[in-house]
Amino acid sequence: MSKNLRKRSKAYKPKQLSSNAHFKALVMARPLSETVKAKFLSDVDVSILAMSRGVTNIDHFHKLATMVEICAIMVKGVFHEKSYEPFIIEAKNGLYRSKQRYEKCGAFGLDGLGLKALKDTISIFSDVLDNITGNDLANAIDIINKNIQEKNFYTPEMMAA
């Protein structure tokens, strides 16, 4: 009772393990380096400065939105810190209003409440970066990418529900 089994058209070639996989695992399990933290914070500082002066481009907006999302994911999922949530929600609302302004007028801009909330969120982001590992950051970015692919975007109405 032998069945006709189809033969593979290609020879089986297993993926080779990386020779430095253990090194990558160790590096990702450590806290973020000062260089990585400085890069993130300098990008965010440039973006908030551009946003407050009205010379923002779409990259600045996306950097700020990513920073706010990383904060939201880390505060909710890793640190379980409820006291930061109002600042993050207001920062999201400020960015949402800024995007609406861009779609209506062609220029990004923040109102006073949004700017203050974003500045507060930057200090939260700094604390978050001091207390996470490379794996935590990679997981947060994966969650953000998954939400983008699923078109699961933030709207203020989401918070009202």
Image (cartoon, rainbow, N blue to C red):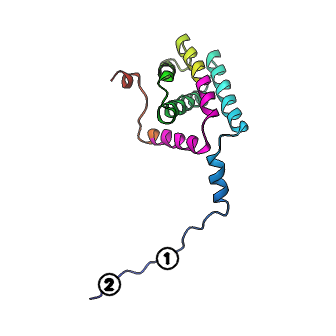
Nearer-the-camera pick, 119 or 64: 119
Q: How far apart are marks 1 and 2 (CA)?
A: 18 Å
Quadrant in which the N terminus appears: bottom left
User: At which x and y percent is residue 94?
Assistant: 50, 18
Quadrant in which the C terminus appears: top left
Q: Is residue 99 visible?
A: no
Nearer-the-camera pick, 50 or 104: 50
User: At which x and y percent is residue 15?
Assistant: 56, 67
Specify whether residue 106 is painted magenta: no
User: What are the residue bounds of the magenta stretch?
Assistant: 122-146
Residues packed near mark 1 inside 10 Å, few (<14), some (14 to 19) or many (20 plus): few
Amino acid type shown at disc 2: Asn
Nearer-the-camera pick, 148 or 120: 120
Q: In this view, does 79 lie to the left or right of 40?
A: left
The furthest residue to the bottom = 1
| Label annotation for residue 10 | 1
| Label annotation for residue 4 | 2
Amino acid type shown at disc 1: Lys
Q: Indicate whether 153 appears above or below 116.
A: below
Res. 130 image quadrant: top right
User: At which x and y percent is residue 99?
Assistant: 50, 23
Q: Is residue 4 left or right of residue 62?
A: left
Residue at figure coordinates x 51%, y 75% from the top left: 12
Mark 1 and mark 2 lie on one chain; the one further toward the N terminus is 2
The furthest residue to the top = 112
Magenta: predominant secondary structure element? helix
| Label annotation for residue 144 | none
Residue at figure coordinates x 64%, y 25% from the top left: 47
Specify whether residue 131 is painted magenta: yes
Nearer-the-camera pick, 133 or 88: 133
